Every structure is written in C-alpha cells, then in structure tokens.
C-alpha cells in the first residue's frame, strides 16, 4: 500500500527473495530503473527528494519474498505519514486505476 502520492515499488522481472540472489546485471538494471523512476517522478510531480528503502530478507522485516525498492517522493518540508487529503487521493487513484508497472509507458514513464 502506498503511503502517499509518488510512492511506488521497483522490482526486477525475475522473482528472487534477496538482492544477493540477483545477477550483477540484474542488480545494476534494478538500480538504473530506480534512478530513472526518481528522475521521472521529480519531473512529473516536482518532488524535492526521495526516500528509497528495501527490507532485504525476513530478519530485516521483508514481508514479500521478492526483492524490491520503495521509492517515495518527498517535499521540501516532508511529512512522515500521509495527510487525510493524501490518503483520500490514494484511495481514489487505487480504485480508479489499479496501476502496475506495465501501465507506466502510457503515463509517460520510460522504465
């Protein structure tokens, strides 16, 4: 579940639980994609910065056994939790769009 507009996940196509299980090329591609996504979010949403996070393995709190990065856009004066208005926007977007990575090209995201 996104915590605010501009929160998305970046994951490799091949499903593996941890970063160490990716090949060097897959790991490099994953980070290139994170970089592209942050660039596009900055351009499209005017983000001032980003939080980029990953829980790598169950001991780190990973609940989905597929390595992925959370990319969360931030404003110049960030709030930790979403506002009521942001939550309403997120729920509306979730209901209307049900987005996944396959829809990004139609939105102008080149990933």
Image: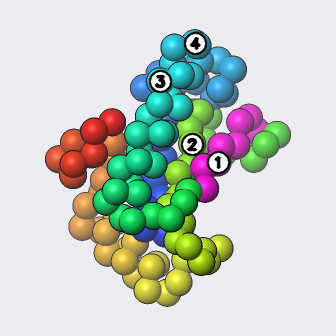
Q: Which residues are magenta?
A: 51-58
Farthest residue, direction bottom:
84
> Mark 4 or mark 1: which comes first in sequence?
4
> Mark 1 or mark 3: which comes first in sequence?
3
72 over 5 or under it: above or below: above
| Residue at (65% x, 26% y) in the render | 19
- Measured from the top left, where is residue 84 in percent x and y? 49, 87
- Measured from the top left, where is residue 14 in percent x and y? 47, 22
Badge 3 crowding class, 10 Å Cα cut-off, few under 14, some 14 to 19, many 20 or more, is: some
- Measured from the top left, where is residue 79 in percent x and y? 61, 77
**Residue 103 visible in the shown view:** no
Residue contact between numbered discs 1 and 2, judged by CB atoms under 8 Å? yes
Residue 32 in magenta?
no
Write down the residue under mark 4: 23
Write down the residue under mark 2: 69
Write down the residue under mark 3: 29
Task: Return the residue nearer the eye: 85 or 92.
Answer: 85
Write down the residue under mark 1: 53
């Amino acid at each position: 579940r996104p915590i605010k507009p501009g929160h998305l996940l970046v994951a490799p196509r091949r499903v593996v639980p941890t970063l160490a299980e990716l090949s060097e090329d897959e790991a490099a591609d994953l980070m290139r994609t994170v970089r592209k996504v942050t660039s596009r979010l900055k351009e499209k949403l005017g983000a001032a910065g980003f939080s980029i996070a990953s829980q790598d393995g169950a001991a780190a709190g990973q609940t989905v056994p597929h390595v992925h990065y959370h990319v969360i856009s931030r404003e110049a004066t960030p709030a930790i939790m979403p506002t009521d208005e942001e939550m309403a926007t997120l729920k509306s977007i979730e209901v209307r769009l049900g987005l996944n990575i396959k829809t990004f090209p139609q939105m102008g995201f080149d990933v």
